[in-house]
Image (cartoon, rainbow, N blue to C red):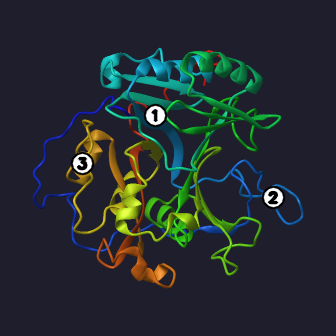
Amino acid sequence: MSATAGTVEHAAAKGATAGSHAHSAPRLFPAVPEVGCVSAPAAAPTTPSGGPDPHCLDLGNVIALEHVNLEVPDLEVARLFYAEGLGLTADPGTTGQQRGGAHVVWYNCGRQQFHIARGPAPQRLPPGSVIGLVLPDVAGVAQRLEAVKQTLGDVSITYARGDTLEAVDPYGNTFSVHTSLPYFPGRAGVAYVQLPCFKGTAAAIASFYAQRMGARARVSEAGGSSGRSTTGGTMRAEVWLGPGSKLVFVEQPQLGAPTEEAVAALFDGWHVAIYVADFSRTYEAVHHPGRPPFNEHPYRDHYHSLSDAIHNRQFRFQDITAPLEKLPEGAEAYGGPAYGNEALVYRISHEVRALAHPLYGRPLYNREGGFA
């Protein structure tokens, strides 16, 4: 979210108060990642007999992806790409004040949004990342993007398959546009955000989301069996963020050793917003004892305790960590523990909302298909 609609910064003392961070072990979720085998985020999960995965519609504590937030230096360039090219709808149901100012535009994509804010420099997902969209008229998207390309120039358009289009925006972010995807609800939306991760970290990332956020998560080897790779194959972690929406992490050995500096360098400040059912437990589980809350952002929802987060109906965090004993041999390559006996393995800014958030379930108007 480019600005926190419906919330205000709640003044709170930084000392020990009810709901503040105690130096004790966090209360984790009992979930563990599933194991499986997939080849692409767009693949339909199946059983060995060829039938549908019986868990294909299951979710965990994370129940909805709300938006992806990116900063760009020119809102008109963004409008040409998102609205004129992709065909998304500038949200007509909010004012600039609700969005955080005239420098913020929300584009509806089914039940999800892109929050695009004017900033000093474009925010880019790591090289090799892909944002997967479901849009009903891929041929129409291609035609509109070709028209936009004549104006912007810096737009790449490629047909990966007959029903899938790959487009690169003027700032280098890649989008895969699908006519449909297995088990994706509705005619449009954000289906996945695929990101590169460091070799040996996919299982740890899946465990973090399962145990710290209660999310449904799966770790697999593309083309292999499951769990931790014994063949040196590429490992993948999938995290379900809601019906049909996932984060997908794919190990990339060329990233090198996941030192704290390398992990930080891979992140460019963008964020995702999600809704969780068990808000207090998620808050307790993701906050590492002795570490301050994440308030290094320009938005209004700063907090210092669970009480503040409850007041705001949301909180933010960005560091994904793993116990050193859960990491592969040679964990010293990770640059030493960043969080006591844990190490930083990935960084994404998360805006975590309670179901009592005032924007939860708000109908979003799409010019193709009406309200979603």
Q: Residues within 10 Å of mark 3 (few under 14, many from 20)?
A: some
Q: CA distance from mark 3 to mark 1?
A: 23 Å
* Residue at image mark 3: 295
Looking at the image, which residue is at 39% across and 51% down? Answer: 279
| Residue 319 in view of the camera | no
Q: Label for residue 63?
A: none
Q: Could you tell me residue 238's position as x and y percent? A: 61, 58
**Rendered image quadrant of residue 163:** top right
Residue 77, x across and y down, in percent:
47, 21
Q: Position of residue 210 (x, y in %)?
A: 52, 64
Q: Nearer the viewer, residue 194 or 45?
A: 194
Count of picture labels: 3
Residue 336 locus on image (x, y percent): 33, 77
Disc 1 secondary structure class: loop
Q: Residue at x 28, y 47 (%)?
A: 309
SS at mark 2? loop
The answer to whether marks 1 and 2 mark residues whose Cβ atoms lie closer than 8 Å is: no
Chain-order first, disc 1 or disc 2: 2
Name the quadrant containing residue 200: bottom right
Question: In the rendered image of this protein, does residue 331 appear above or below residue 296?
Answer: below
Give the answer, above or below, for where 154 lies relative to 284: above
Residue type at mark 1? Tyr
Judge the density around disc 1: few (<14), some (14-19), many (≥20) Cα neighbours within 10 Å.
Answer: some
| Quarter that holds the N terminus | top left
The Cα atoms of the two marked residues, 1 and 2, are separated by 32 Å
Q: Distance of mark 2 from mark 3, alpha carbons?
A: 42 Å
Could you say which is closer to the camera, residue 10 or residue 105?
105
Which amino acid is tagged 2? Thr
Q: Quick one: label 2 or label 3, which is nearer the N terminus?
A: 2
In the image, what residue occupies the spot 28% across and 33% down? 7
Left or right of 43? Residue 148 is left
- Badge 1 is on which residue? 360
